[in-house]
Amino acid sequence: MSAATHRRRWRVPLSVTAAAAIVVLIILAAALAPWVSPYNPLDIGSFDLMNAELPPAFMVDGDWRFLLGTDNQGRDLFSTMLYGVRISIVIGGGAVLLASSVGVVLGLLAGYFGGWVDMLVMRVGDVILSLPTILLALLISGIARASFPNAGTAQWAPVILVGAIAIHEWVQYARTVRAATMVEARKDYVRATRVIGLPGLRIMARHILPNVLSPVIVIATINLAGAVLTEATLSFLGVGMPPTYPSLGTLIRIGNDFVFSGIWWIVAFPAVLLVILVLSVNVVGDWLRDYFNPMRRGRS
Amino acid sequence: MSGAPAVLVISGLTVAYGHPDDPPVEAVTGVDLTIAPGEIHALVGESGAGKTTVGNALMGLLGASGRITAGEIHIGGRPVDTRTGRTEGITPGRDVGAIFQDPMTSLNPLFTVESQLGEAMRHHLGLSRAEARIRSLELLRAVGIPEPERRLSAYPHQLSGGQRQRVVIATALSCNPQLIVADEPTTALDVSVQAQILRLIRALADERRVGVLLVTHNMGVVAETADRVSIMLRGRVVETGPVDRVLGRPEHPYARALIGAVPRIDVKSERLATPSEENPAASDARNAVRGRMRADPASASGELAVEHLCIDYGGASWLPGRKARVFRAVDDVSFSVRPGEIFGLVGESGCGKTSVANAIAGLLAPTAGRITLSGKPIAGRRRAGRALQMVFQDPYSALNPRLRVRTALAEPIVFYRLATSRAAAAEDAAILLEAVGLDRTAGARFPHAFSGGQRQRIAIARALAPRPSFLVCDEPTSSLDVSVQAQILNLLKDLRDLTGLSMLFISHDLAVIRQMCDRIAVMQAGRIVELADTETLFATPQHAYTRELLSLVPTLDRIARRAAEQGAPSNG
């Protein structure tokens, strides 16, 4: 019944292994985009409008220089997608990181202190959750663009996007961590630290936090997929990344204008990549949720 | 004994747990057991001895990973198919009744008493709803529930713990079983309720000629109730026989040690007998701990005074216009603990003793009253700081599962700058571990690597780490086995003698209190009803409640008394 034999019996299903491999592959490709991709789509001098809208290489009019064809500006689609998925992952990951840090801290405070701190955090969270994610994100991006002229540029758009996505997602972390903290805070080991006289912040950071973190990891994984999708949606709606620094969502928006002209590849390949990425992350996340669920332990 | 066939015969029972891939672990090895009609056979042993597994094997409740690998079970003369756990013509629930440990969870909270009681009878005996109702009423009367007509339509949460356990017993009896398996039936109950339930089980065996397999860890329960007893050690029965003989003159060394470790209520002994000896390296470490604690001016013996302490629960509601429902858990409690004294606080569950402990430890703000430690007020926001530490009841939740033992022990030492460097703090932690009877290398491990008793030792070491002058022990041994309990009690006593710590010792177990404490306060419904020296209290209890408590505790005394009456030489 020891933990070691238990872990051995918990075989990882093939689908999860495959999904994890795909996630790792996509992240690697995105991270190494400047070295892996044949062209640099961010360098305007490297592409030619003459090559615009070329079909993928395997089609009749295809050109082997452009494996998956080119977009309306003559950029190599494969390279652009690699850079695009890089931007998507950075923004999605950034949003998850921001949301989880804010949510964990607020959840710990609310759960540990209770009283008016708890009331304040949870009611603000309830108000935020009563607004749809996209609506709130649109609102934030809109306000940011109206207030700061630079907000739409390639430098600031990711920051605005991360904020706009995270403002909705932190509530989920805060709720989970608050509930777990309330359970842990009643346990004797936390009471013992209080009797010893350690200050509240130290008890929270050192004793409670490590014990409430496993659900956070699960939510973060599943949220990553959601955040990438939200970013894609925002970019598709035109309030995300500018066309010069396209994310997957921006590429899908560009491609959407050409679908009915028979130029399907600009929308299809980024969309398929997005689906594969989100699906794989979700499969891994679901498995993690089961793995950390104590109810599932003991069944083999 | 009568010539009736035995209701239960177990021969050579061996049960193994484990996944088919792994080598099986034998939880029970070659157990033989016979129960005649009307006989109560107690199965005792410490946790992990396999006593519950025997009960589960009988009921076909072994679970997916447990298998009967050898042996036979005959219930009422008919064999149990050891592969499926089924017997031809024997149905669990009809012929074998079960009483489980926790009456709070063994009834379904969504159904009334009537539907739960009637369910088995309608299913197994084919009774109609009306017939089942009549029988349910009879059963509730038989188990002594007041106003049975009204209780039939009650839900479990409307009954007290003792009433629920009576309903569970009624359910077990509903189909006239020949055999009842009672797994720790009174462990979750207060002594007064426990005494009633045990009398009820005894009466059932005598009047209905039901055989009872009583699984328990409490020797007092065995002495008061059972006819025969089997003592189990690591899956084997090491000694079996009539209760008077086994408990009075045990033969097997383990049986002797186990019975010797039971704290007695009639005599005070300096040290409890323990089955295993203390680690010899401990004495050096203890001297080191003593040196450090004596050298610390802040850790002179603490003198605690509690004056007119009141604690209310419920408090004011933040919604305006709603009337607050206040429950007074502690009502005008005053006592003082002298330097170097172990002061006992005893009472049944819900009497407010833990609330008192929490208020003293600063975990709970008192509604009124004053608590001072060595003259300084410590109630509410003003904590006692490192001068007062606490040992908790449940050693499994008292240690942070993600922190190495070493780190957990060094934390308060570093926090209060009691050591000059981190290395010195780690050395202090190692010495503390040795002082509580563990190996100094234990510090490198995580809490899950330790047993309950070892964890409680670690918890005690952690409480000593800030070099306190006062220790609050809230039921420190009530979740431990008898032999481990004896070790922990000895340890606490030794530490008091060594360092001159004062202690507030809270327990529901009068025998433990008697062995540990210099003075005792008895609490009932939030008030102290009697406060006296230990010897005075046990010799001449003044208050009616104290006398009642003392008379209800199941003890080994019955055996001792009987041996004395018979004038039998009881030199073991």
Image (cartoon, coloured by chain):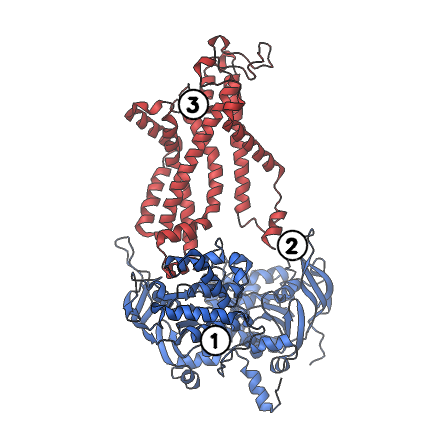
Real-space Cα separation, disc 3 to disc 1, in angstroms: 73 Å
Give coordinates of residue B423: x percent, y percent.
Answer: 45, 57
Residue at image coords 42%, 18%: A244
Q: Quadrant of the C terminus of chain B?
A: bottom right
Residue holding disc 1:
B512
Q: Are marks 2 and 1 on the same chain?
A: yes
- Residue B64, label in figure: 2
The local crowd at label 3, few if under 14, some if 14 to 19, many if 20 or more residues have their Cα within 10 Å, is many
Tag 2 and tag 1, C-beta contact below 8 Å? no
Disc 3 residue type (three-letter) = Phe
- How far is mark 2 from mark 1, CA to CA? 39 Å
**The color chain A is rendered in:** red
What residue is pinned by disc 3?
A236
In the image, is B333 to the left or to the right of A43?
Answer: left
Return the x and y of residue B120 as percentages of the image width and height.
59, 61
Instruction: Decide if residue A26 is on the left or right side of residue B82.
Output: left
In the visual, does B534 lie left or right of B111?
left
Q: Is residue B152 visible?
A: no
Q: Chain of mark 1?
A: B
Q: Secondary structure at mark 3?
A: helix
Tell me, yes or no, if residue B288 can be seen here.
Answer: yes
The amino acid beneath tag 2 is Ala
| Label 1 SS | helix
The earlier-in-sequence mark between 2 and 1 is 2
Of the chain colours in the picture, the one used for chain B is: blue
Q: How many marks?
A: 3
Residue B42 appears at what percent x and percent y? 61, 73
